[in-house]
Image (cartoon, helix red, strand yellow):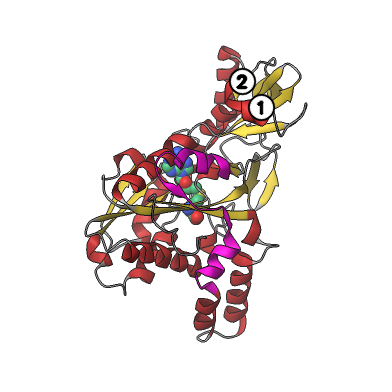
Amino acid sequence: MTPLAGILARRIRAEGPITVADYMAECLLHPEHGYYATRDPLGADGDFTTAPEISQMFGECLGLALVQAWLDQGRPPQVVLAEIGPGRGTLMADMLRATRAVPGFAEAMGVHLVEASPVLREKQRQALPDVEVTWHDRVETLPEAPLFLVANEFFDALPIRQFIRDPGGWRERRVALEGEALVFGATDPAPLADLAHRLEDTGPGDMVEICPSLPPIAGEVARRVGIHGGVAIFVDYGDWRSKGDTLQALKAHEYCDVLAEPGLADLTAHVDFEALAKAAAPHAAVTRMTPQGVLLERLGITARAQVLARGLSGAALESHIAAHRRLTHPEEMGSLFKSIAYHPKGTPPPPGFD
Ligand code: SAH
């Protein structure tokens, strides 16, 4: 039993079963035993690898998309360059390197990182040694200014609630105790206004998920883009309207039981891109959901890969070619991962999006 399992068992004994969202929040961000609060989970020695850790080309392409949007919007003089959930800081470092050659951008922007984990904030500091960075706990404290923002694999780490369709309404999945063991249970069925639109595409026994903290965060980003200008690009794994149980645990690059080792495994769920679009709609224009592979191809990843390949040979060249394939190929990350962007209403979509 992990230390966090003991804490959760005591809480459930005292308060009764907890929602999946409560369970996820404790597992990921408990100040002492939470997964992100206590470790750097990324890379070959960690539990999972993300696009910016696979190749510098990912951050270069996204950086050029942001800076092109900045040029297209008339080079606003004081802008916020921001990332939510920056991990090791690799994506921001690659974006900054790729945009350095664009006259005026470095002088116009300040770098802002929204990060909950003290361990990862320290990693980010090390990855960006010569950069003046302002860290934030939440997007609400970013300066009110044109916002050029990216987030990769951030929303998949936010806690979700799970509901099972029942003839009598929806039963919410809960984490309960059986003896000393954490087990899944469910509430009695009840109607739920928030899920009225899911009655059309589900039947009894189907599971749907909602991420309660997604709309406030995405809505706040869209509000700023709508009022001040800028662009926000989100990349994550998921789909339009997720269906079924997508909660998964990953440890040392292997799937494991979601309830087995709370605090020691990464927990994620598919991101519902419809929710990302809906949260932004009152404030900003939203692009079509675009597969990661398509986005990166449109942003010129293959030409960039060819340039980088010229300096490589042997194993380094092979691993470079494999990285390009991993990021773009439909059987790898190319289609499972999707992207969507917010831009000011009445302006064309940012580069890479229709
Ligand atoms: N974007 C990085 C890391 C993805 S992992 C990459 O692509 O490599 C998820 C990131 O989101 C981590 O940095 C984690 O600490 C951060 N995070 C998770 N929940 C958060 C929250 N509620 N607020 C801010 N950051 C959070």
Residue 240 in which image quadrant: top right
Q: Give the range drawn in magenta.
A: 272-301
Name the residue: 55% across, 19% down: 11
Residues under labels 2 and 1: Cα distance? 10 Å
Cβ–Cβ below 8 Å for labels 2 and 1?
yes
Q: Mark 1 points at which residue?
A: 163
- The answer to whether residue 272 is left or right of residue 81 is right
Q: Is residue 298 magenta?
A: yes
Image coordinates for residue 285, horizontal then vertical, percent: 44, 48
Question: Which element carries disc 2, helix, strand or loop?
Answer: loop
Residue 41 or residue 213, whichever sits in front: 213
- The answer to whether residue 267 is left or right of residue 126 is right
Is residue 224 shown above or below 212?
A: below
Residue 133 or residue 338, whichever sits in front: 338
Q: Residue 192 carries which label?
A: 2
Q: Which of marks 2 and 1 is nearer the N terminus?
A: 1
Determine crowd level at label 1: few under 14, some 14-19, many 20+ residues with C-alpha closer than 10 A: many
Q: How many labels does the image show?
A: 2
